Image: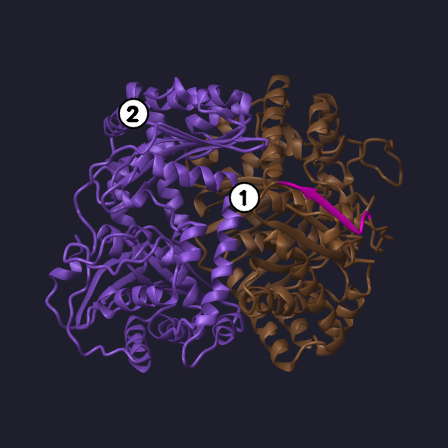
Chain colours: A brown, B purple
Amino acid sequence: MNSAVDLPLGLADLSFAASGDALVRRTVLPSGVRILSEQVPGARSATLGYWVAVGSRDETDAVPATEAHPLIPASFGSTHFLEHLLFKGTPTRTALDIAISFDSVGGEHNAMTAKEYTCYYAKVQDRDLPIAVEVIADMLTSSVLDRSEFENERGVILEELSMAEDDPADVANERFFSAVLGDHPLGRPIGGSPQTIRDATRDAVFEHYRANYRPQDLVITAAGAVDHDLLVSGVVHALEAAGWDLGVEAAPVDRRATAPAAIDRGAAVVTVQRPIEQANILIGVPGIVATDDRRTAMSVLNSVLGGGMSSRLFQEVREKRGLAYAVYSFSGAYSDAGVFGLYAGCAPAKATQVTELMLGELRRLADGGVTPDELRRAVGQLSGGAALALEDSDTRMSRLGRAEISVGEFSDLDESLRRLHLVTAEDVRDLAADLAGRQVSISAVGSVTDDMFAGLVS
Amino acid sequence: MNSAVDLPLGLADLSFAASGDALVRRTVLPSGVRILSEQVPGARSATLGYWVAVGSRDETDAVPATEAHPLIPASFGSTHFLEHLLFKGTPTRTALDIAISFDSVGGEHNAMTAKEYTCYYAKVQDRDLPIAVEVIADMLTSSVLDRSEFENERGVILEELSMAEDDPADVANERFFSAVLGDHPLGRPIGGSPQTIRDATRDAVFEHYRANYRPQDLVITAAGAVDHDLLVSGVVHALEAAGWDLGVEAAPVDRRATAPAAIDRGAAVVTVQRPIEQANILIGVPGIVATDDRRTAMSVLNSVLGGGMSSRLFQEVREKRGLAYAVYSFSGAYSDAGVFGLYAGCAPAKATQVTELMLGELRRLADGGVTPDELRRAVGQLSGGAALALEDSDTRMSRLGRAEISVGEFSDLDESLRRLHLVTAEDVRDLAADLAGRQVSISAVGSVTDDMFAGLVS
């Protein structure tokens, strides 16, 4: 899937796309480190990301590492735990030093653990990019995972899980993934559970770190006020200064399957009873994978069905009937599975009605398709939104990373717009029909019962 | 307070500041409409805002309109209700038409009701700015507030309130304001209560609309790819086309008091018992007003105490002890009152300890002040953060509006940085001592009791 492995090893420096005024360049070091940048003329700041294609889906409690699954097993939630620990210190920087490096220049810095990757990023003024390159390299390569810091951070993560547990929409979302995707690893929550976090050991997390944070796993992307050659030399210098041996040749690692996995639904209906005001309802089906040719049609479908104030869900559920404040649709695409979902928060007494309305809109799209007006508006919304989003170097940095890790190819804005204009009403209706024909799962949190939804799914 | 009223009536066109490369211009029409813009060279998009200086604090249930309080009374939550209704249609545009205007070009459009103002805004590509100017003008001037749309939207707003009620941090925040500010109008929640929303009538909200959305109330700000002269002519054309008579001379309205109000604390401790995982704790005191000369020192204080990962609260509560995931401080400044607060979400069993730690850090700042290193870092954080924030036209648009409505003067980045560099360690310590000497209130939501906090406040 990932074109990088097909390149001859060596310093492959490939300028592969121009995105508007911006120049995209990609370098693969002999050690397998990949560096991508998008220089935006006139930019005064840059966003930098260090990516490793390890996420919660790669964790396992039971299966030992094998040829087919070369990851070191880590208990559920360990990838996210590790992400926290990389802010806690190296031999040359304390946690406070790391925090000061970014705070003292007004930069934003943070990290995110996802189901298929982990990313450490910073947004800084151009003059501060070298220090960001250096500090994140130090975190990535040389974190000590001190035992007492590990215990402190266990407490922090347990509080993070508690916060999510107190957010009914978060809870509904976690149950949604396991209801739709069943036992597939993408169905698990990213953060693990309080029990797996309490059981996690420093040494297992350290082993996970050592096994999976290697040159051939690392992707570095930057966008904005960035000079590619300076970035490459800065990264090489920082990684070597931090002790990595970049002299060992290795091919970039691509962990992901390319074919969609078979999905066995976890549950038709899952409810969590809570004495709260709203019913938080998620309705969904297995979606498409990240490389699916229909992903642009999916964007159009999502825009028409639940992507804005003019969308069908918003109009039918909120504008015409006043049944919800928040109502929308969403699509999540991963390497070998995906989800497509509809969300609404409403009064429990209206839960059945709102669920019927949302399911009805999905079926109506499958049966009747989209109108020419809707198709034109969706194309306008998506192309305009993409143009606005690309004003932020954050968006460009993320797009580069996801292209390298998840999709395996980079599309500049012009190419994306070209694909968008090729989508037909028939493409959208066909995709809607495909989705509407899949097994539906419903996840709801609030003063709800299974009975409210039992008759609506088969 | 507001310099506008001192200008001779007539077309006062004042280019009053250059912010970096950007040119700020301000025009006051004879009718009292104020138009401010900040043209950013090279920008391809613009953010536009229509502001009216009416917020939840201006609502009243009991007091009739008087000379001293010229607003038409509206039941609590009516300002926010009205904001929703302005998206529901005019004689020439349905709610769907309004939504399509923005969705079809990929623009972001929304509105916010605050305690002292309401703002309707849109972010669009440069070519779409004229339509944004026209559509928002139509919404502001000509909404019909149809009775059946009113009933639908009542349902939407009740769901919005339910969603907030299900968010423990939101609930703690609302109780916090009334605990710290007591009966002051700024202590009330912006959205009203389910009861006041159920009681609201279309005619009262319509009267509120007619009385307070007038030329002399209106401030329009835009930033990014905007030509000031074209903006002014576009606004004039759109307001007149929508039926406003701009030929009647009027001075811009300034509703706000300039002197700090006397504050009587509402409660020392207020708790809401809920069977959830975390205790959501807010500790606070009355803060400073928006025009206070110490507002830059307040920014520095906030940065040092709880403004980032290197801040004292983050280090003491999270890094060293692992007691919380989210912990920070904040300052809210309004025309005649303000709040200063500390937040943490933690295990209920740790609520007393975390509260003591946070109060201890405020007192330590009052007693010992900040170190030279902390002061230098805070200045770096605030200046770097300001530079990054100004890359977004949203930030510039908001800054113009708040300067006009809340502060009464506009400071460009250079002026802000000059003031920042003048702040001394003594200024920060003096302000901390002032704040630490004020009556403390605590608001907590979760498995908590008043006893957990009773000994900590006097």
Q: Secondary structure at mark 2?
A: helix
Residue annotated with mark 2: B436
Q: Position of residue A95 (x, y in %)?
A: 53, 26
Foreground of the two, A377 or B349: B349
The answer to whether dots 1 and 2 both sit on one chain is yes
Q: Residue at x 22, y 77 (%)?
A: B246
Few, some or many C-alpha atoms within 10 Å of disc 1 (few <14, some 14-19, many ≥20)? some
Q: In this image, B172 relative to A330: left or right?
A: left
Q: Residue at x 28, y 44 (%)?
A: B417
Amino acid type at image mark 1: Asp
N-terminal of the two: label 1 or label 2?
1
Screen quadrant of the C terminus of chain A: bottom right
Q: Position of residue B107 (x, y in %)?
A: 49, 67
Q: Which residues are magenta?
A: A266-274
Foreground of the two, B320 or B79: B79
Residue annotated with mark 1: B166
Count of numbered tags = 2
Q: Position of residue A368 (x, y in %)?
A: 73, 77
Q: Which mark is residue B445?
A: none
Vertical side of B335 occupied by B202: above or below:
below
